[in-house]
Image (spheres, rainbow, N blue to C red):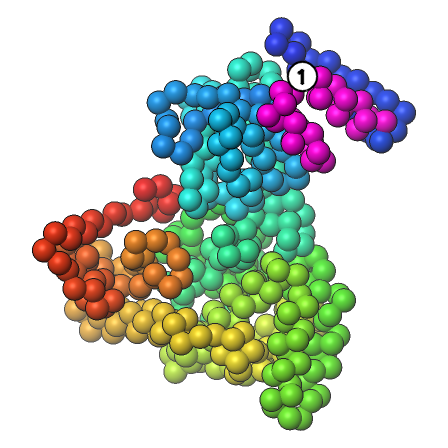
Amino acid sequence: IESTFEVYTEAERLYLFGLESPDAAREWLKSIAKSFVPPRAEELLALDFERLGRLQYKGGLNLEQAREGWFALVGSTLHGCFPDGDRQEPLQLRKLQELSIQGDNEVLVLVERRRTLYIQGERKLDFLGWVQAIQKAASSGGATLGEQQLTEADVPLLVDRCIDYITQCGLTSEGIYRKSGQNSKTTNLLELLRRDARSVRLKEGEHQVDDVANTLKRFFRDLGDGLFTARWGQEWLRATALEDEEEKISEYRRLLSNLPTVNRATLKALINHLFRVQRFSGENQMNTHNLAIVFGPTLFQTDGKDYKAGRVVEDLISHYVKIFNVNDQEMKKQQDEITAIMKMREAASSGTQQAGDFICTVYLEEKKPEAEQHVKIPATMTAEELTFEILERRKIVMKEKDYWSCFEVNEREEA
């Protein structure tokens, strides 16, 4: 209800207050909050919060006993103020790797890339409100890119899920992206991913490659404000008229820098993916030109009459390394992954691949792009063998008192 706010009391009572304007409601809300928020948490009052209160939490290295913290929900960001000056970065709820409820709706678990936070309420009514508010804030909030659930790299999780699946299962699929999937399956899958991409796991055998590819295309076609944005879209199309290649590349790089962060990260992820797809054109029949014909009208949301849309996509794929300033390390990583996929396909076609073989991403010491390796894991490979292979690839010599461990992370990314 407009111009209202709720107050939960320790006596398990809920009060709803209404005023004549949103500004008046906000002024009363902050004044009331200031009367009960302790001095150490007063910094939260400066935020344009939608919800503020006291909760029990566990996190970091101390999981034995719950402590009292003060939290403020601002859009899709959860701010916390903890005892003893235990300051932490705000949680970006749309970037969570997991959001779940444990027990009888008693504990809310928020898993980020580097930390896990367990939140408990002191009173059921109040905690239920927090759970619903956080779940809503952590879901996709609209049709534009910036309102989607995101990866750590600011790419919509929906896009990341589809690209990852097609990379693993569809790079050699003939006519990938040109062939249409089943319309009903595409519609259902897109709806699931839009609602909560975090909970959707695309699996070979359960999902068809063409359905996933069609889902990705439809997402971009229906995207609010488009990938290139309404403001800059025409300038991208005009850039195709430049005859000098270096001048054209420079203009593309300028336009790229003008895009919002999420749009820029998403465009790079998509073109990186299409760059890989065309590397397998001998098998999938989708070279750079064919991909451009498909994705030009899709990304610029045109009816296909403007040929310049396809030219933009073709240029971006052809000059991917220069436009996106891809360094040697990134190219090596991509080449390693492509090589691993090709070896897997060769093994499968020759019958030498064993059941259970798969391509796995392995990180050395920390989860960063520069520490990433793509390895084919045979069904018979041990953790020790995998460890030695990674060390050998990175040319790390084991010393006498060195101890290396190998940890497996399941698909929900829990250690």
Residue 346 location in percent, x, y?
25, 74
Q: Residue furthest left?
A: 400
Q: Is residue 347 left or right of residue 73?
A: left
Query: Is residue 144 depicted above or below 373 in this figure?
Result: above
Residue 61 in which image quadrant: top left
Circle 1 sits on which residue?
36
Q: Which residue is drawn at 72% across and 71% down?
A: 233
Residue 171 falls inside the magenta stretch: no
Query: Is residue 316 depicted above or below 185 in this figure?
Result: below
Residue 168 location in percent, x, y?
37, 63
Q: In this view, does 215 lie to the left or right of 369?
A: right
Query: Is residue 258 depicted above or below 71 in this figure?
Result: below
Q: Is mark 1 on a helix, strand or loop?
A: helix
Q: Residue at x 22, y 62 (%)?
A: 390
- Residue 359 visible, this orientation: yes
- Residue type of the residue flagged with mark 1: Phe
Q: Residue at x 58, y 82 (%)?
A: 315
Residue 395 in which image quadrant: bottom left
Q: Main secondary structure of the magenta part?
A: helix
Numbered range of the magenta stretch: 24-52
Query: Is residue 161 depicted above or below 271 in this figure?
Result: above
Residue 250 in which image quadrant: bottom right
Residue 55 location in percent, x, y?
54, 22
